[in-house]
């Protein structure tokens, strides 16, 4: 009992240190309030909200997300927040919250408005005049790059008079209308006419948000292969790693793992493939598991699962450099504490279709290095003239350009050809990345291209070394199990004999019976 | 008082008792009290939601009120939907008949908006008492001797066991199966033994019960074959050609119900079962399955899914409903593949069958709680009231599948001799009984095999529900016929016997 209590205290303390520190150390005074009107799935409102949370986390801003109708008077003005972001997903709904409008007006921190329904007062703070354009297909441009947006929108754009910083421009297809700024920042106020969680717009929105809320250093993008699982085609994975290395492209792989059945051959094969990745300029992000069901009691189970996954990988010289997770994990108290906070590199990926929470609190944290996952595919239509211009993009936050693990050989070849032709100056983990993950009592590290386990350097070979031998089918003994087994066998023998005797007697009896009536 | 005086008094009392209370009435009254206390006296008992209840609740217009408990506690009250219900049935089943009836009763008597779980219990309770009455009549009539009352007590001991009756206050489909099986069994035996007592009505009761039973749950579809066997006996009772046509029609109806139930299994259910047949069957009870499945054309990485559920209980490396899993696993491991795998790895299959044999007599659902939260019992607490029979059977029934096969042979020999003797003497009762037992024994032997191939050891105890019911019926009949001297000859007469 004492031991348990002690363990619990250690876990609690560890959890507090790990979970709470990043928030309190650099965040509390800089928390940004995100207020959204509605999720509005018809325009992928959830993804927009998630993308916004992701960008803010990457710029180093902790967040609190609140629905407009749930906002209560005074929430903003009690000086808890450094900034506020208004996200309008459903302008037709015309949701209003008088308290919010009033508080926002009085609020002195940074303010960003995204979407329609920009009030006259807000426009005035931006020193701008509103202008509506209807149902136009837009091209977003910046520098020499341009991307045609695959949708048409009714949007409110600004005619700014003075003292504003712009991030990108919007050109309607009707040339006569002119062109307008995309991201606008004037002093403490900012405006984005719309938000997309992918594509060129995301990059420009990121620049706007970084300008307003954070100071994240500009980084080269990290090529990241996502969607790898222990059930993926491992031959294809090793081939991918070898080819990327041959092309001189460093990369990361985001993979899930298993906590059970690790004594099986299949798990050795999986870790062997991951060591090939490590030996070919690849680094591993351990992706958090999918959540089937969870509740407020799931914390310790998640801790167990993560520690078991990490330790089983670590024992086989697969040392993850970070944790990757869907964005919604950052909005859950338990997922943050037991899943994400153990690593100083956290990579956020788009949310799956269903998001299952354990203890949702909508308080996004930041981590020493928070990476934003952005689909490479969504940038392939950014062009400079006829050329794909991914290599010219300036990423305002730590960005992982994600590519889904190819599902067949043909796609692998196509993907390799595409990535090698892009000519992007990729992020070099071997030279630039420093990583630290704690897993139970173990610490995993990575710096200057060398892996560390509990502080000692680890050599990654083709075969795993130092893996303990496993004994298959460990038998568990239940108190009376053996008795019942013996009893079962005895009964079995007993019934066999009885049946034989019964059949013999039947025949004998019948013969005697018949003989009784036979004439002698 | 002299000994003779005592004896006379006893005889007088016995005469009065036997005149006023038949064994069937005694069994019914006892079952009514025993089950009634469990199910209706507050704080009443039942079975908590195992996660499957929504299938029976939402389709029938019930919803969860605040504080609805899963697994741990029985939730006594549910809401009744007041507006349009857009849920469609996830599965085809005859279970909604019972649930709808319960809601109607609830609305007529109790409330239009709140559903009391006891109405569900009541809808099963009343027909259940009828089935106990019929069953006891079939096992004891026409006698009212002391041994007849012993048989009645045995029936109560076995079939009023709380492990069965707890099901009534729940949204499981099993109580329907239990009751319909009792009706079918009793009806068929009554037709055989008392051909002058409403034979046509009872035959109709038999066929309707069997069809509803098969349609009650997808997993019952293969049972259609077993019940076609049990119906063969009817040909010996009804001798006219025109009557044969009706019986043939009934058997055809049973088979068609089976086929319909089978074909109406949704793709989603197939995927779930196929997946769990692999993760909870093929991958279990073997050292390292990686190579074995690779040999048979499935990526060996899928060995890592050992013991995984289709709907992960907490965390998993991949969503089993993902497209890649369907392509790599489900599309390759059909029914044929699994059969082939077990043929090549018979010892593993045998071990799995022994697991099934070990589970089959444990009828109490241990995975969910039996009490309400208000009762103050810990989460998932189990009722021990009147569970003597299920505890005994669960603890002492041998946990070997080979034993089951031997037992089957022994029972077939015993009942076969009875049938042979009747055939020779141109009687029918024991012939009908033989086919009935044979059909039930096919349930006893084949359901475990089908369950393992169809869904592995996932939910095994529930998939095997019809096995203990069938075996209990055979054993009760064995004891009853032994006491009534009808085991070998159907004209056994105990009128002259003392007790």
Image: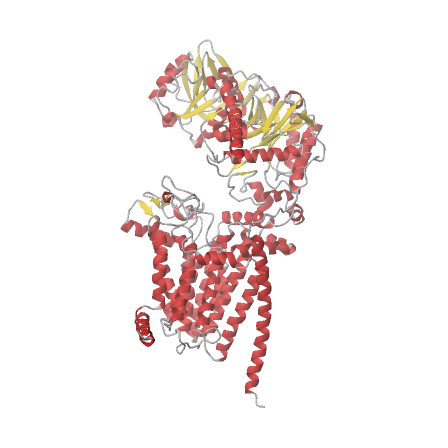
Q: Depth check: give the residue in front, B368 or B103.
A: B368
Q: Horizontal and vertical percent for residue B436? A: 47, 67
- Vertical placement of residue A503 versus A281, above or below: below
Q: Depth check: give the residue in front, A308 or B485.
A: B485
Instruction: Single out the residue that lies furthest toward the left.
Output: B109
Q: Residue at x 59, y 58 (%)?
A: A486
Q: Residue at x 50, y 17 (%)?
A: A208
Q: Depth check: give the residue in front, A249 or A130.
A: A249
Task: Tell me where residue A228 sits by quadrant.
Answer: top right
Please state if B213 lies on the left or on the right of A495 as rendered: left
- Vertical placement of residue A351 versus A392, above or below: below
Task: Tell me where residue A143 sits by quadrant.
Answer: top right
Q: Horizontal and vertical percent for residue A471? A: 66, 44
* Residue A332 in sight from this viewpoint: no
Instruction: Single out the residue that lies furthest toward the bottom.
Output: A520
* Residue A304 in sight from this viewpoint: yes
Q: Horizontal and vertical percent for residue B200? A: 37, 70
Instruction: Single out the residue that lies furthest toward the top.
Output: A162
């Amino acid at each position: 009992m004492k031991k348990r209590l002690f363990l619990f205290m250690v876990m609690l303390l560890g959890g507090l240190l790990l979970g709470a520190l990043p928030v309190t150390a650099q965040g509390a005074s800089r928390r940004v309030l995100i207020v959204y009107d509605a999720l509005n799935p018809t325009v992928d409102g959830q993804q927009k909200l998630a993308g916004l949370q992701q960008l803010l986390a990457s710029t180093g801003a902790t967040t609190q997300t609140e629905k407009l109708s749930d906002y209560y008077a005074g929430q903003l003005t009690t000086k808890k927040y450094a900034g506020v972001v208004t996200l309008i997903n459903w302008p037709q709904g015309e949701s209003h919250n008088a308290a919010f409008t009033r508080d926002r007006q009085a609020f002195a921190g940074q303010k960003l408005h995204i979407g329609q329904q920009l009030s006259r007062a807000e426009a005035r703070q931006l020193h701008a005049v509103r202008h509506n354009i209807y149902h136009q297909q837009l091209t977003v441009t910046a520098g020499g790059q341009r991307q045609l947006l695959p949708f048409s929108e009714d949007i409110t754009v600004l005619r700014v008079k003075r003292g504003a910083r712009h991030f990108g421009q919007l050109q309607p297809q009707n040339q006569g209308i002119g062109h307008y700024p995309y991201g606008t920042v004037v002093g403490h106020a900012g405006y984005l006419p719309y938000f997309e969680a992918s594509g060129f717009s995301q990059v420009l929105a990121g620049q706007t948000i970084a300008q307003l809320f954070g100071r994240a250093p500009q980084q080269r993008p990290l090529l990241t292969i996502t969607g790898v699982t222990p059930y993926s085609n491992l031959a294809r994975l090793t081939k991918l790693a070898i080819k990327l290395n041959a092309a001189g492209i460093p990369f990361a792989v985001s993979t899930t793992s298993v906590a059970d059945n690790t004594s099986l051959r299949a798990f050795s094969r999986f870790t062997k493939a991951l060591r090939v990745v490590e030996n070919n300029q690849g680094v591993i992000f351990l992706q958090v598991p999918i959540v089937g069901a969870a509740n407020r009691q799931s914390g310790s189970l998640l801790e167990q699962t993560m520690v078991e996954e990490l330790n089983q990988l670590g024992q086989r010289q697969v040392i993850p450099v970070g944790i990757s997770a869907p964005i919604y994990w950052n909005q859950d108290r338990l997922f943050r504490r037991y899943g994400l906070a153990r690593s100083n590199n956290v990579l956020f990926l788009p949310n799956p279709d269903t998001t299952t929470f354990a203890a949702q609190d909508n308080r996004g944290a930041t981590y020493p290095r928070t990476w934003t996952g952005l689909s490479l595919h969504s940038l392939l239509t950014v062009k400079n003239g006829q050329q794909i211009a991914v290599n010219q993009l300036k990423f305002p936050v730590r960005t992982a350009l994600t590519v889904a693990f190819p599902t067949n050989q043909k796609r692998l070849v196509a993907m390799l050809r595409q990535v090698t032709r892009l000519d992007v100056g990729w992020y070099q983990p071997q030279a630039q990345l420093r990583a630290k993950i704690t897993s139970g009592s173990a610490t995993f590290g990575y710096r200057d291209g060398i892996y560390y386990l509990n502080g000692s350097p680890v050599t990654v070979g083709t075969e795993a070394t130092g893996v303990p031998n496993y004994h298959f089918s460990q038998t568990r003994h239940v108190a009376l199990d053996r008795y019942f087994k013996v009893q079962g066998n005895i009964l079995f023998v007993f019934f066999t004999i009885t049946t034989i005797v019964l059949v013999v007697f039947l025949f004998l009896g019948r013969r005697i019976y018949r003989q009784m009536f036979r004439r002698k | 008082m002299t000994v003779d005086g005592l004896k006379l008094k006893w005889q007088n009392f016995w005469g009065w008792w036997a005149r006023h209370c038949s064994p069937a009435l005694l069994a019914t009254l006892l079952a009514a009290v025993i089950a009634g206390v469990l199910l209706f006296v507050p704080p009443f008992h039942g079975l908590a939601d195992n996660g499957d209840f929504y299938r029976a609740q939402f389709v029938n217009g019930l919803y969860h009120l605040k504080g609805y408990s899963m697994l741990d506690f029985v939730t006594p009250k549910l809401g009744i939907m007041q507006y349009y219900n857009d849920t469609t049935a996830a599965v085809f089943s005859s279970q909604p008949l019972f649930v709808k009836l319960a809601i109607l009763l609830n609305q007529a008597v109790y409330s239009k908006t709140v559903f009391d779980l006891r109405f569900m219990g009541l809808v099963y309770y009343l027909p259940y008492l009828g089935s106990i009455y019929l069953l006891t009549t079939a096992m004891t009539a026409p006698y009212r001797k002391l041994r007849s009352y012993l048989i009645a007590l045995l029936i109560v001991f076995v079939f009023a066991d709380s492990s069965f009756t707890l099901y009534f206050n729940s949204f499981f489909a099993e109580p329907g199966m239990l009751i319909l099986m009792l009706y079918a069994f009793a009806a068929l035996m009554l037709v055989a033994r008392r051909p002058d007592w409403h034979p046509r009505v009872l035959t109709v009761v038999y066929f309707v019960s069997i069809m509803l039973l098969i349609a009650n749950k997808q997993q019952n579809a293969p049972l259609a074959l077993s019940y076609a066997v049990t119906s063969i006996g009817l040909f010996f009772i009804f001798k006219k050609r025109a009557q044969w046509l009706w019986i043939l029609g009934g058997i055809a109806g049973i088979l068609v119900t089976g086929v319909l139930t089978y074909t109406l299994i949704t793709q989603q259910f197939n995927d779930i079962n196929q997946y769990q047949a692999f993760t909870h069957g093929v991958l279990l009870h073997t050292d390292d399955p990686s190579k074995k499945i690779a040999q048979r054309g499935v990526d060996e990485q899928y060995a890592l899914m050992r013991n995984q559920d289709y709907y992960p209980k907490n965390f998993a490396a991949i969503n089993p409903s993902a497209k890649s899993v369907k392509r790599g696993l489900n599309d390759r491991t059909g029914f044929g593949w699994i059969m082939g795998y077990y043929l090549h790895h018979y010892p593993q299959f045998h071990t799995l069958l022994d697991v099934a044999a070990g589970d089959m007599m444990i009828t109490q659902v241990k995975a969910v709680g039996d009490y309400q939260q208000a009762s103050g019992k810990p989460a998932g607490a189990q009722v021990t009231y009147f569970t003597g029979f299920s505890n005994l059977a669960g603890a002492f029934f041998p946990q070997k599948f080979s034993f089951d096969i031997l037992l089957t042979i022994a029972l077939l020999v015993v009942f076969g001799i009875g049938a042979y003797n009747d055939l020779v003497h141109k009687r029918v009762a024991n012939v009908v009984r033989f086919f009935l037992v044979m059909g039930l024994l096919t349930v006893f032997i084949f359901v475990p095999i089908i369950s393992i191939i169809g869904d592995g050891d996932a939910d095994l105890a529930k998939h095997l529900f019809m096995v203990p019911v069938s075996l209990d019926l055979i054993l009760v009949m064995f004891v009853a016929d032994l006491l009534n001297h009808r085991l070998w000859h159907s004209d056994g007469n105990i009128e002259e016997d003392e007790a």
